[in-house]
Each structure stands twice: as C-alpha cells, then as structure tokens.
Image (cartoon, helix red, strand yellow):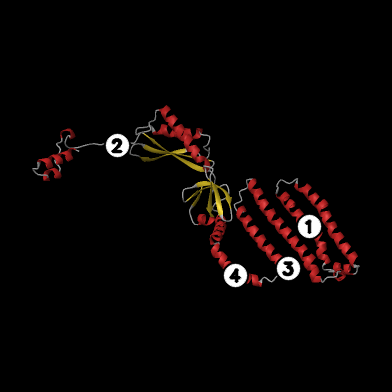
C-alpha cells in the first residue's frame, strides 16, 4: 500500500513507466540471471525432477512478473483517473484478463510438473504404486481449483451454478456411475496396496499378466502372449487378484516327479537336488530340496522344490528342469513308470465258464424264429 501511495504522487505517465519498467526488468532478471543460474545448478544434481520443475515453471514465472505491472496499474488511482474509462472497465479489460492468464499458466505448469515427474519416476524403474492414481487425482484437483479461482477473479456468483450442478450432478451420476465406480475402485486398490506397475498378477478368471498401466478407469495387463488386457478397476476391486510379485518377486517352483517302486530313494533325492542346483534359473538361496509326497498307484510321488527370481521365469524353469530330469533319469537308469493296474480273477476258470442264457432268451419260448433272433442277440 505504501508503494502504491508513493506512485500516486507521481504523474500518471511516470507512474505507469516505473511500474512497467520494474515488472519487465524483473522478468528479464528472472529469465537471464536467476533461471540461468538455476539451470547450472540442476545439471549437477543426480535426479532429473528438478530439471522438469525448472523447465515447466519458467514460462509462468516470467509471464507473471511481466504481467504484474499491468495488474498493478489498475490499482493506482492516479493512473486510473488519467484513463478515460472507469476503473471497473479497466480491470475488466486489463487487470482481470492478466490475472486469469497468470492463473491458467500456473495451473498448467503445476499439472505438467507433477505428471512429468510421475512419468520420470516410472521410466527410472521406481516402484511407486501411488504414482498413477496420484497423477489422476492431482489433475482433477488442479482443474477444479483453476475453475474456482477464475470464477472468483471475474466475480461470478457460483450459487446458481452450484444449485444447477446439484441437479446436473444427479443426472451425470446415473449416466457415469460405471466411470465413478471405476475411479473409486482404482483408489481403493491403491490404498489396499493390491498391486503396482510391473507386478505379475493372476485374475480370478485365470488370466495372468504384468501390470503396465493403472488408469482412472481401468488397469492394463500385458499377457505372456504380448496381448494387452484392459480390466475395469471396479471389477478388480470386487474380485480375487493374486499378486505373484508380492511381497517378494521371487517365486517357488514345484516340479512333480514319479519313480518306480524299488528305486533307491537316497540316490534319487541327491540327483534331484543336483539337477536343481545346476540349473541357472534356480536361485542358490533358499536351497533346492525335494520331498516324498505320497505312495501313488503306480509310482512313488516326489516333488522338487526350488526358487526363481521372478514369477515370469517359472514356466521356463519348469521346462528346463523337466528336460534335465528326463535326461538324467535315463542316464542313471531310474524308471519313470507308466500308469498300470494289476487285475486278479478268483473263482472258476474263465476259459471253461459256460455262458448262461439271458432272461430274454428264456421268455422267447418255442417259436423257432423268435428263438433264433434271441440267440443272435445273445451272441452279439
């Protein structure tokens, strides 16, 4: 206020010249001195987040300093009195548009800074599960805040708008209930920490894939067949989701093995462990082991247990272990039995058994044709 009062004492053209010179000078200093020094500093940092913030905030910062003079001129009584228009008209044509432009530039810059920062973190491999949902919520908050600020600048009464929005909100709510359900489903999945981008998940329907995107409406999975599957968040929030990448990405592999009765079990167990240790996909810790599960109908049923570094490697590890088990068993002479049954027949010798007539042949009676037909039926 003291600064404005001192400017009122100057002739209008001098006051306008001083204000514009100061605002434009501040914009030039910010662009060629402050921001240039800041760019030198951020190039020496390890993270790229500060470079993103500096690049996005440069335009609104310089523009705000340049337009600040226009806004201040509409508040100096001497300058306003020298202009052949009312102060309200001056603010409507110069002050409010300048302030609106500044608000829009800052809103755009802040939104882009956060969204680019989220993309940068994901490109660097950082596992921030909140990032996609936070980006979506942030964009919504900035949009609502910007609209409210612009309405306030132009002194627009929002009471009728709020009343109309209540009625329209009910209609939109019914029309977009699925979209709203998907949005809140995504928020619920985030707070439940169900999965993150990069996790390998299995859905209740049996589909499996890697989470590549968590959006406002849906989550996108990339299957092992390189097919993108888009699932609404509301569906994921209401069904069972198996996250095979949590709490740790390593996963245990189970390989069932059946051997013939009479096999040397000590030799078998040592051979199975050696096969797992020799496989490059199998982790050294926890150590591989095998377990005798049950006496099967045709075989002694064992299970080889080992660990791999990622759930996406389980199928390949099982394939290579099965190949190695087959080759090593053939070399060691360990039999993998086929399913078989031993059937014992007690009582009369089946070769000497006399066929008994069926009830149908006895009731056929003495009719020769009927008897012959019945005998033919028995023979068939």
| Residue denoted by label 4 | 166
Q: Earlier in the sequence, mark 2 or mark 1?
A: 1
Mark whose residue sits in front, 2 or 4? 4
Answer whether labels 1 and 4 touch (C-beta < 8 Å).
no
Q: Residues within 10 Å of mark 1 (few under 14, many from 20)?
A: some
Image-based side of 336 in relation to 49, left or right: left
- Residue that lies at the very extreme toward the left in this rendered image: 366
| Residue denoted by label 2 | 341
Q: Earlier in the sequence, mark 1 or mark 3?
A: 1
Say which quarter of the image contains residue 351.
top left
| Residue in the image at 71% along x and 59% along y | 107
For label 4, the SS is helix
Mark whose residue sits in front, 2 or 3? 3
Say which quarter of the image contains residue 74.
bottom right
| Residue denoted by label 3 | 154
Picture coordinates of residue 248 (x, y %)?
Answer: 54, 46
For label 2, the SS is loop
Q: Earlier in the sequence, mark 1 or mark 4?
A: 1
């Amino acid at each position: 206020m003291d600064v404005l009062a001192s400017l009122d004492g100057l002739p209008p053209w001098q006051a306008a010249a001083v204000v514009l010179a100061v605002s434009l000078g501040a914009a030039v200093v910010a662009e060629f001195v402050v921001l240039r020094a800041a760019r030198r500093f951020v190039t020496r940092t390890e993270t790229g987040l500060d470079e993103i913030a500096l690049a996005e905030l440069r335009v609104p910062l310089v523009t705000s300093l340049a337009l600040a003079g226009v806004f201040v001129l509409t508040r100096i009584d001497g300058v306003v009195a020298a202009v052949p228009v009312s102060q309200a008209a001056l603010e409507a044509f110069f002050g409010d548009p300048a302030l609106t432009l500044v608000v829009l530039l800052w809103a755009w810059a802040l939104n882009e800074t956060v969204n680019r920062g989220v993309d940068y973190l994901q490109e660097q491999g950082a596992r921030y599960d909140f990032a996609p949902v936070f980006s979506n919520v942030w964009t919504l908050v900035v949009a609502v805040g910007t609209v409210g600020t612009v309405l306030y600048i132009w002194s627009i009464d929002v009471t009728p708008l709020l009343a109309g929005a209540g009625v329209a909100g009910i209609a939109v709510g019914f029309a977009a209930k699925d979209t709203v359900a998907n949005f809140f489903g995504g928020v619920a999945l985030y707070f439940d920490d169900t999965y993150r981008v990069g996790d390998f998940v299995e859905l209740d329907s049996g589909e499996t894939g890697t989470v590549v995107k968590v959006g406002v409406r849906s989550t996108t999975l990339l299957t092992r067949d390189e097919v993108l599957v888009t699932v609404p968040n509301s569906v994921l929030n209401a069904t069972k989701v198996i996250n095979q990448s949590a709490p740790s990405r390593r996963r245990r592999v189970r390989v069932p093995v059946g051997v013939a009765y009479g096999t040397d079990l000590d030799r078998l167990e040592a051979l199975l462990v050696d096969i797992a240790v020799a496989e490059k996909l199998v982790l050294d810790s926890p150590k591989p082991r095998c377990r005798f599960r049950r006496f099967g109908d045709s075989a002694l049923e064992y299970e080889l247990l080992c660990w791999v570094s990622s759930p996406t490697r389980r199928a390949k590890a099982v394939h290579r272990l099965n190949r190695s088990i087959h080759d090593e068993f053939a070399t060691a002479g360990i039999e993998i039995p086929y399913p078989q049954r031993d059937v014992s027949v007690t009582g009369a010798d089946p070769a000497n058994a006399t066929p008994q007539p069926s009830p149908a042949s006895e009731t056929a009676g003495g009719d020769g044709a009927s008897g012959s037909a019945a005998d033919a039926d028995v023979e068939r």
